[in-house]
Image (spheres, grey):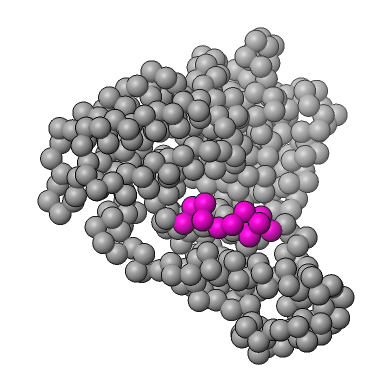
Amino acid sequence: MLGNLGKNLTKTMKKLAGMAIIDEEVVKEVIKDIQRALIQSDVNIKLVLNLSKTIEERSLKEEPPKGITPKEHVIRIVYEELVNLLGEKPAEIEITTKPYKILFVGLQGSGKTTTIAKLSKYLQKKGFNPAVVVSDTWRPAAYEQLRQLTEEMNVPLYGDPDNPDALDLAKKGLEEFKKQDIIIVDTAGRHKEEKDLLDEMEQISKVVKPNEVVLVIDGTIGQQAREQALAFSKTTNIGSIIITKLDGSAKGGGALSAVAEIGAPIKFIGTGEKLDDFEAFDPERFISRLLGMGDIKTLLEKAEEIAQEDVDTESMDALLSGKFTLKDMYSQFEMMNKMGPMQQVMNMLPGMGGKLPKNASQVTEEKLEKYKIMMDSMTDYELTHPEVIKQSRVKRISRGSGMRNEDVKELLKYYNMTKKAIKGFGKRKMGGPLGQMMRQFMH
């Protein structure tokens, strides 16, 4: 997430954790590393300098609380000030009336259409019954794209590609879905210079009378997010913001901090292309992950969602303990599609972000399916005791699955690398004062 920002901040925290003495020189060195990481992620220089000044003053002047070492105190200060930079507290969508009407606005190409589908799925998981109205008459593919996405989830959709009147579409859609819990209204993506579209958005807002206006912003635009949000807020009352495309975006830090600065809360972030790559934005959890402190809350929530879907969660225990067999890994592959890529899961474990070998974390769906076919050709004993699989067994498994010997060896190599990477993670990794502090961050 956020390109190299997380990597660089985690590296800085590790360096700080390894320091024997914390003095002014060490604090200034840490601050320089943080400045470099934030500026590279396109965070506004003025914000970075203010943040640096606060961290330095607090680190050198504040007395560490009882039971906390100076080193841990500085780590906590860095954590708290980065959280403050992104808005401090999470802001949830609160459904206060039914139907609760949400109006979506944003620039062309911001990921608005996909984000509507992601939010619909998120709301479904929360027990709500959303419906979508398409009033975008400028982009012919908008209706078809949303039709395909909502059909998968059984979310009702209203739209008419042959009707050029956006206001009429909005009115009819609201009437159609007046008994739904939530109505999400899509509008045409626009540029802030397009007066016709901005006027149309203002008129649709008057027709819909939304309970909430959501602005979707592309995380790759960095600091420009602030200017964009301000331009939209002049036309309609922006209630919340969703930042998209934060998976690997080099400018994501700039977008997050710029939008947090204008006052409208960031409620959700998009972290990938799949419909499940979407999460409520919580600055504390987000910064915990960026600093390599993990995000156990989100991990457990994902596991809980899976449990509700009747998927085997024993492999989650295996993942957390590092004591898993090939049989556990088979279940884990099933779980991966639900929880997201292995690297995302690892980033939620304290101290584990970035530790999984690249070739072990980037398992494509195609390769994952191939691995499962090979495991179907193994005996129950081989699945629970992978160490017995030597050359003769490799040959039998490859013949039975229609794969090559090299493919079976690759599967075993992947299994051993993954097991080694997470071996030893568990309660003992959470011991000591730093572990106690991480637990405080998570509660």
Along the viewing direction, whichever of 120 and 269 lies nearer the viewer: 269
Residue 65 in sight: yes
In the rendered structure, does residue 360 fall within the stretch colored magenta?
A: yes
Along the viewing direction, whichever of 58 and 222 lies nearer the viewer: 58
Along the viewing direction, whichever of 277 and 7 lies nearer the viewer: 7
Q: Is residue 40 left or right of residue 90?
A: right
Magenta range: 352-363
Residue 35 vertical position relative to residue 420 in the rendered view, above or below: above
Q: Is residue 12 left or right of residue 330?
A: left
User: Which quadrant of the view contains residue 296?
Assistant: bottom left
Quadrant showing the N terminus: top right
Residue 372 in sight: no
Q: Main secondary structure of the magenta part?
A: loop
Image coords of residue 241 (percent x, y): 51, 31
Residue 91 vertical position relative to residue 129 in the rendered view, above or below: above
Q: Is residue 402 left or right of residue 159?
A: right
Image coords of residue 111 (percent x, y): 66, 34
User: Which quadrant of the view contains residue 358?
Assistant: bottom right
